Image (cartoon, helix red, strand yellow):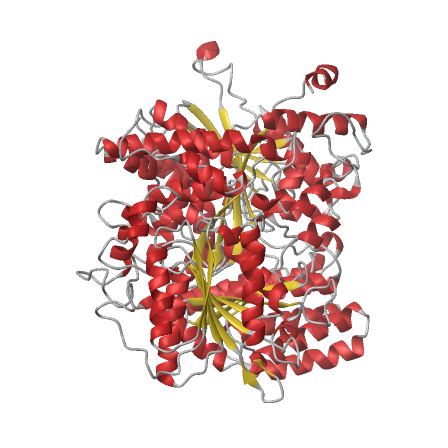
Amino acid sequence: GRSDRYFKKKKEKMKRGHQDILHGGGGWYAVAPEMERGKRKTTMGAAEEGGDVDELLAALGYKVRSSEMADVAHKLEQLEMAMVSSAATNDDALLSHLASDTVHYNPSDLITWVDNILSELNAPPPPLPTPQSLPSADAYDLEPLPALPAPATPLVLGSDPQSEVAPSPRDRKRMKVCSSPPSSSTTTDAATSAAAALPVVVVDSQEAGIRLVHALLAGAEAVQQDNLKAADALVKQISLLATSQGGAMRKVAGYFAEALARRIYRPQPRGGVGCCSFDSVAFDDMLHMHFYESCPFLKFAHFTANQAILEAFAGCRRVHVVDFGMRQGMQWPALLQALALRPGGPPSFRLTGIGPPQPDNSDALQEVGWKLAQLAESIRVDFRYRGFVAASLADLEPYMLLDQDADGGGGGKDEEPEVVAVNSVFELHRLLARPGALEKVLGTVRAVRPRIVTVVEQEANHNGGTFQERFTEALHYYSTMFDSLEGGAAAAGADDGGPDQALSEMYLGRQICNVVACEGAERTERHETLAQWRGRMDRAGFEPVPIGSNAFKQASMLLALFAGGDGYRVEEKDGCLTLGWHTRPLIATSAWRVAAPAEDPLSALAAR
Amino acid sequence: MAGSNEINANESKTVVPLNTWVLISNFKLAYNMLRRPDGTFDRHLAEFLDRKVTANVAPVNGVVSFDVLIDRPTSLLARIYRPAPATASAAVALLPDLCRSPSPDPFPVIIFFHGGSFAHSSSNSAIYDSLCRRFVSLCGAVVVSVNYRRAPEHKYPCAYDDGWAALRWVSGEPWLRSGKDAKLRVFLAGDSSGGNIAHHVAVRAAKSGVEVSGNVLLNPMFGGNRRTESEKRLDRKYFVTIEDRDWYWKAYLPEGADRDHPACNPFGPNGAKLEGLPFTGSLVVVAGLDLVQDWQLAYAQGLKEAGHSVKLVYREQATIGFYLLPNTDHFYQVMDEINDFVGSNL
């Protein structure tokens, strides 16, 4: 199809190893297609290739090629006739079917949207996966794990068949992470960031709040200009102004001021691990857990990713999920339950959980697996688990993730191959701190031929431009984030959200500190926007799998149940879903699969 | 395929450019799927299908936008559009600059109510973001696009209350005043249901002694119990049907009310008298292929008879939504009319 041809061209470019202007028939891109994309403010997709998109409709969010306009019009007429004739026969069933049962995808791609609906009229859709039940942590007893005492003997590589450790630190150093590809992996795409929007939601237009923001931005400017004396004075002024502020703004200002101060004075990082970080992974997981409880962002992330995974696993008897950030495994009880309730019964389910090394050598990763195994047993899902400890995802190799029991064990040749889903919630952006790491990881992902790759990332550019630009963008982002925490508490009728809110603020505060005070390999909170991730995934050989209206609806309903849900908004953009506070998207879920392989370049040329 | 149910798609196709036809037909068919016969609305699907854009403090064609929470309990948001502040050329506009007057000279503040028949769209819908940006470039205005609560979840008078809240908020912002007399030069504008809201907020303003410099109503949504000639003649011909109009009124108006309710029919049997009120002057734009034009023309006539200034612009071959795409004379000439009207009432 169209998207196949698009990715073919990308592959050929990569093969030739340079990015000259490609010419030929319509649809070849000028140099750096990501710049084209940035300029047009649209994303890649079928409509862009092979002809000009109607600019006026594109400005309104619809991608239709001019050459296809008449075709789209004709299909709309056909659709209307079908709707009219069903109304004439008083058959409301069709209309209500179109609305409630049909799953809509990617409304911006108008011709495909209409095509999908027209085909719905001709063939009944396959049954949708069972909707997930709402996650409730207490039902599955996944409390934060207490720190375990150090085992008598240290964990030995390979001795425990279920908990494998990636090569030891010494070995990792010897391993070449990756040969260095073009620098586009860590530098941001200037054109995309120039064209990218900076959305601002002002929740408090009081004079004092504005002066506070002004002081913060001036502080960042001073740091940018290396005027540390002025920066220091401003940090003090900020702290003073912040005391007269209330609510979210005061707290945000506090974190940004502290981060600025750290940047100015550069205190020695604790234990050399990096600024603003704590030694304990358990502490980190604990903050993460409270963030999970106090606001819907992580729940949304898990829910929408699970939806895409469920759909990808439809009809499969053997499935394997690779979780790039296992932590407390909060995402998986709901998926297990949905699979258990699947018509036709659950598949056999394998889970690979990746987690960072624990300094106290505790095997938290294994503990989580055991708990999930207990749950799986109680709902009769055949379950296997393997945990991998890795300081970086770039340490993973495909062989670690592939099914080592295939062709062995039971089933033999007749057994269905394993269908793989790779899941990454807020993990990919860390890889941008080291050149080549992301490419290595995406290469590993491609090598395991996943049916679906689910990615959730912060919807912000905290990795581009100058320090001042980064600071400004982060200030607006976290102001909105903190306001959502306040809003949630207020809506729940509480004066404040209690320990959950405070710890969630700390969780976010550490991100702020990292974005503002750290640089180089230490700066791991390198958030980028959906548009930027699309470019990266595209270059790495993935194509988008649109997330549909059913996932959107269910996520929206989940939010409505969440106290403070009023301000939260789910939006669809080019097949991805975002969750935001008021009008500002804050996190984005996208789904991907490996793009179709390239054809012979000569026949591709002839086809044009 | 003869009979009253036949939709003559060919007719509407001959009067609008093809891309306009595709855009509005797409809305029409999508909207058909959202309205349920029992009066409920598939809000989730509506939000899924609506194309939205975020605000942007980076200048695009010299215009920046940002969202403001006007009223927290109702989550009432408005999107503010303004000329890019002088300090930010290509750079991102900083918050303090955003809330500074764009000019010491008099400039209009346009409170804009988007259309959607009280049920559809939002202030961050792409079609309305685009239109509001154009108003800024056109008139040097600050535009406040109100994200009012929609039917059927929120019936009359929620939309009007939200409009009033926006006017009050605008009145309280010092940076929106201009000229030597530091005066707020506020216009109320809207298309379709937004035009209806603009009228009713203007009435409240007149009754409350709040000065409004002018009303701009684009294809405003009015109606009544009887079927007018234009409704019967144009039913189903140009994207809109009597049936869908009835549905939207039922969704917005109070339970049990009919279309002679004053919200729908301000100059009907239950309408308030506007004689003697300091009601503002109006620019009313009517599309000649809009089936509710008889109501819109009656509205303009009603204002005149009540002694208020009305400029009526009648575009004979225009359909609904002509102002969404800059690809017809209707579009450009009506924009000129708006500019003239705002400029002369500043």
Q: Which residue is at a point 67% across and 40% down the rendered structure image?
A: A536
Q: Which residue is at a point 28% across and 77% down the rendered structure image?
A: B273
| Left or right, residue B217 beside residue B141 | left
Residue B237 image position (x, y, % from top left): 37, 41
Out of B310 and A41, give the one closest to the viewer. Answer: B310
Q: Which residue is at a point 66% across and 65% down the rendered structure image?
A: A472
The quadrant where residue A550 appears:
top left
Out of B261 and A310, give the one closest to the viewer. Answer: B261
Compared to A49, does B170 lie above or below?
below
Compared to A374, does B71 lie above or below?
below
Residue A270 image position (x, y, % from top left): 68, 62
Residue A126 image position (x, y, % from top left): 35, 26
Out of B57 and B266, give the one closest to the viewer. Answer: B266
Q: Residue furthest top?
A: A413
Out of A231 and A340, give the one closest to the viewer. Answer: A231
| Left or right, residue A140 beside residue A405 | left
- Is residue B52 in view from this perspective? no
- Is residue A138 in view from this perspective? yes
Indicate the quadrant containing the C terminus of chain B: top left, top right, bottom left or bottom right.
bottom right
Q: Which residue is at a point 79% across and 37% down the rendered structure image?
A: A180
The quadrant where residue A411 appears:
top left
Indicate the quadrant containing the N terminus of chain B: top left, top right, bottom left or bottom right.
top left
| Left or right, residue A575 beside residue B179 | left
